Amino acid sequence: MSDSINAEAIRDILREIIDPEVGVNIVDLGLIYDVLLSEDGRYLIVRMTMTSPACPMASHITDEVQGALRRRWPELSQVEVELVWEPPWSTDRMSTEAKRHLGWDDA
């Protein structure tokens, strides 16, 4: 198993995925709640949310997460994307960069 797989590397890959409705990557948007890697490094769970439970892009985004992680680390035996709704997403979860991108000058 490659030493390069860790929470930071996983988040770096996930930064490449842009929420098509907002135009901001899903990490800076605050959609990624947790990344859990098994001790043997073969099983990965990404816990994430959407900006709204009614998000029409949810399946597209979760498919993108799965695909990006599997392409980067094909040695993973399982990649699970778990949608969670607690705590509810809010703009407080967004990075300063995401707020600036959206023109929120008080970021």
Image (cartoon, rainbow, N blue to C red):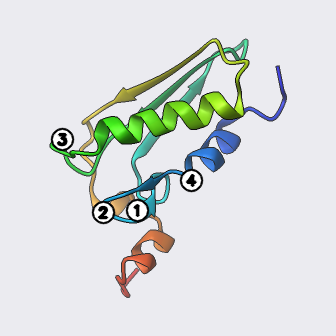
Verify CB contact (< 8 Å) between mark 4 and mark 1.
Answer: no
Identify whether 85 is placed above or below 96.
above
Seen from the viewer's position, the closer of residues 57 and 107 is 57
Query: What amino acid does circle 1 point to?
Result: Met
What residue is disc 4 on? Answer: 15
Question: Would you identify the image quadrant in which residue 91 lies?
Answer: bottom left
Verify CB contact (< 8 Å) between mark 2 and mark 1.
Answer: yes
Residue 45: x %, y % from top left: 51, 24
How much space separates mark 1 and mark 3, taking CA atoms? 17 Å
Tell me: 10 left or right of 28: right
Identify whether 89 is placed above or below 29.
above
What residue do we see at 70% from left, 42% from top? 9
- Quadrant in which the N terminus appears: top right
What residue is disc 1 on? Answer: 94
What residue is disc 3 on? Answer: 53
How much space separates mark 2 and mark 1, taking CA atoms? 5 Å
Q: Which mark is nearer the camera, 1 or 3?
A: 3
